[in-house]
């Protein structure tokens, strides 16, 4: 009976949008989304679940859970999938371009030696934007907890996941918490079959998904072999950055040791330059993986500069696209089964806990250092949640307040 339900139930198409619509929406976020990957997920939820209503909380949490399981930058992968579901392949490209290019362009310019930006990461404006991220993540945690933790069991899973992530300070603690949440949900939750109206169709067939995953694997194996044969800086760098984007769990900060080991020992980048670029990457909105654009622009490529920055930016993000687009058709098919739905109930609750833990560390700990910081975060939260003020407007106010409060 379950097989018939799964194979015969029609799957609703997402309301179609245009790549231009997706580009504009993500460009706004690419210019204003400070605070790291967890804050990005909060901004995405505010924009696409609450404001634009492209999907509901449960579908959004399902997508976050998938991208947490996959290696690479989870927030960028969620963005690509949102664009894919909204406007097809061009929508996925538009989402990535809008969210990524603003910070990539700034970091390439920084690589050209704009020394006056050296203290940007420590400026009052950036501090105000970090405080704003506290409010955004808090809003996301509270909103998702109301819809995804409706009973004691799932509330307990969320609390337990947060405690686990805070206790085990490693990238894999998030994956472990999500896996345990899925096991508990599978064994203990009692849920009805997912209504047909909630099925989502991202427009990727299983054949296409398999092809994309095969391309991902072929590049992962083939690029190092090609680099060994060619012995050129460009191919070696592309291979190293593709591997970094393919094998790292836990987001942008975790990829830094791999990138440092790839570019500093061969002498492509000095350690001081690497650290300067990392500091600048902390001060710009969007994904931290755009640090690759800085490195590519600063490295001694034959054509260097803009070309080098764009080449390595594509190299580090390509595996993220191949993985999320390749995995989506299988994920969407699997989660229609009753047992998977029960597991997803537990996983979604664990995602709330993981975001809750990240609200404290690193979002809170890196931003709230005084009573004035807390008051600013509280004001931003009130404007977002109770005043329904646009996040873009609140971002501007937070930046201004941070500048005024700076010593």
Image (cartoon, rainbow, N blue to C red):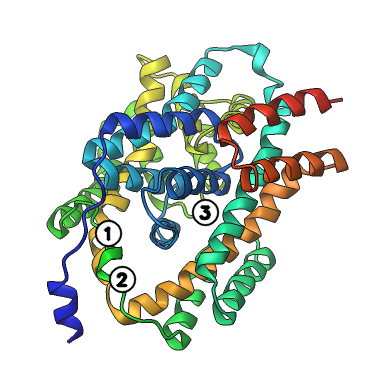
Looking at the image, can residue 222 be seen? yes
> Looking at the picture, how far across and down is residue 256, in whole percent?
55, 41
Q: CA–CA distance between discs 3 and 1?
A: 26 Å
Quadrant in which the C terminus is drawn? top right
* Cα–Cα span, label 1 and label 2: 11 Å
Give the foreground label among 2 and 3.
2
Q: Is residue 236 visible?
A: no
The numbered mark at residue 335 is 2
Q: Earlier in the sequence, mark 2 or mark 3?
A: 3
Instruction: Evaluate if marks 2 and 3 touch, with contact meaning CB atoms under 8 Å apart.
Output: no
Q: Position of residue 36 (x, y in %)?
A: 58, 42
Indicate the position of residue 251 as horizontal and vertical percent values: 51, 48
Q: Could you say which is closer to the camera, residue 212 or residue 66? A: 66
Give above or below for 135 relative to 147.
above
Q: Nearer the viewer, mark 3 or mark 1?
A: 1
Question: Residue 47 placed where, x, y %?
Answer: 47, 42
Occupied quadrant, residue 128? top right
Q: Quadrant of residue 326?
A: bottom left
Residue 355 vs residue 199: left or right?
right
**Residue 139 in the figure: left or right of residue 345:** right
List the residue tagged with mark 3: 250
Question: In this view of the protein, which residue sits in the foreground, 134 or 299?
Answer: 134
226 or 201, which is in the foreground?
Answer: 201
> Mark 3 packing: few (<14 Cα in 10 Å), some, or many (20+)?
many
Pointer 1 or 2: first along the chain: 1
Sequence-first disc among 3 and 1: 1
Count of numbered badges drawn on the protein: 3
Local secondary structure at mark 1: loop
Identify the residue position indicated by label 1 in the image: 200
Q: Which mark is residue 57?
A: none
């Amino acid at each position: 009976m379950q097989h018939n339900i799964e194979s015969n139930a029609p799957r609703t198409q997402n309301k179609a949008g245009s790549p231009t619509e997706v580009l504009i929406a993500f460009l706004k976020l690419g210019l204003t989304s400070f605070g790291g990957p967890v804050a990005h997920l909060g901004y995405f939820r505010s924009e696409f679940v609450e404001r634009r209503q492209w999907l509901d909380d449960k579908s959004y949490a399902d997508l976050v859970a998938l991208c947490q399981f996959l290696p690479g930058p989870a927030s960028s992968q969620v963005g690509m999938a949102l664009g894919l579901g909204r406007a097809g392949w061009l929508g996925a490209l538009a989402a990535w371009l809008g969210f990524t290019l603003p910070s990539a362009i700034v970091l390439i310019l920084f690589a050209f030696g704009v020394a006056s930006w050296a203290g940007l990461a420590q400026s009052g404006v950036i501090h105000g934007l970090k405080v704003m991220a506290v409010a955004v993540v808090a809003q996301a945690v509270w909103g998702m907890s109301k819809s995804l933790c409706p009973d004691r069991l799932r509330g307990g899973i969320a609390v337990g996941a947060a405690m686990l992530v805070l206790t085990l300070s490693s990238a894999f603690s998030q994956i472990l918490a999500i896996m345990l949440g899925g096991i508990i949900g599978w064994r203990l939750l009692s849920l009805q079959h997912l209504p047909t109206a909630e099925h989502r169709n991202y427009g990727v067939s299983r054949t296409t998904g398999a092809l994309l995953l095969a391309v991902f694997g072929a590049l992962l194996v083939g690029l190092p072999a090609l680099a060994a044969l060619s012995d050129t800086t460009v191919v070696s760098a592309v291979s190293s950055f593709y591997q970094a984007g393919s094998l790292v769990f836990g987001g942008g900060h975790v990829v830094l040791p791999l990138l440092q080991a790839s570019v500093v020992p061969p002498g492509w980048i000095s350690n001081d330059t690497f650290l300067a670029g990392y500091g600048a990457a902390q001060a710009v909105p969007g994904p931290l993986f755009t640090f690759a654009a800085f490195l590519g622009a600063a490295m001694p490529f034959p054509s260097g500069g803009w070309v080098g920055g764009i080449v390595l930016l594509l190299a580090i993000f390509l595996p993220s696209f191949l993985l999320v687009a390749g995995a989506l058709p299988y994920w969407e098919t699997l989660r229609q089964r009753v047992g998977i739905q029960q597991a997803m109930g537990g996983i979604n609750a664990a995602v709330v806990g993981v975001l809750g833990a990240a609200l404290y560390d690193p979002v809170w700990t890196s931003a709230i250092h005084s009573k004035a910081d807390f008051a600013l975060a509280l004001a931003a939260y009130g404007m977002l949640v109770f005043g329904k003020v646009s996040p873009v407007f609140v971002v501007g106010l937070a930046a201004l307040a941070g500048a005024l409060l700076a010593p």
